[in-house]
Amino acid sequence: MRARSLIILFLISLLTTDCKKGDTGGDATVTAFVMHHSKAINFPTVYVKFDAKDLPSDPTTNYDLKLVGVDENHVHIKNLRYGNYYLYAVGFDSSIMLPVNGGIPLTINWKNRRNAVDVTVPVTE
């Protein structure tokens, strides 16, 4: 009888537990390089929307994670789980003296959930 109760308790906990995809708490690290044409953008800000494949309606207020590049032309997004993300970047291109922005969807597959991934986030004026 005790074994049956334990099995039922285990099944209930298994069914009510969320499978968290597209969130932090994993082992993947993404290095997001922000590029305007072929020029790297220094000190970018990258907004990350979890479980998304499309640009959010307002990506600078409707985001789940914000990272600011310090002393570099990229940001490291750490501890991601497998799933879908949308990366939106803003910065300033000093060669044309204009702000730039843009984004790209990113999918981390189950087999890459523990790897380092490099991605280029293209931006434009």
Image: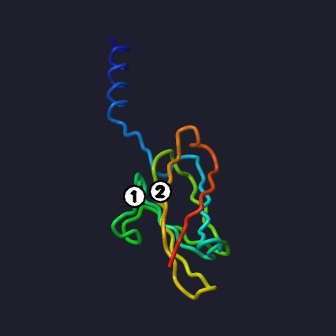
Residue that protrudes farthest toward the front in the picture: 37
Q: On screen, 89 above or below 95?
A: above
In which quarter of the view is residue 14 placed? top left
Residue 13: assigned label: none
Q: List the residue tagged with mark 2.
A: 105
Residue 54: assigned label: 1
Q: On screen, 20 above or below 91?
A: above
Quadrant into which the N terminus falls: top left
Residue lying at 49% horizontally and 74% vertically, measured from the top left: 101
Residue 54 image offset from top left, x and y in percent: 39, 58
Residue that protrudes farthest toward the bottom in the picture: 97
Residue lying at 53% horizontally and 39% vertically, measured from the top left: 110
Front residue of this view, candidates 86 and 7: 86
Scheme by which the image is coloured? rainbow
Residue 117 image offset from top left, x and y in percent: 62, 52
Badge 2 element: strand
Q: Earlier in the sequence, mark 1 or mark 2?
A: 1
Q: Are marks 1 and 2 in contact (CB under 8 Å)?
A: yes
Mark 1 to mark 2 CA distance (whole Å) = 7 Å
Q: Amino acid at mark 1?
A: Asp
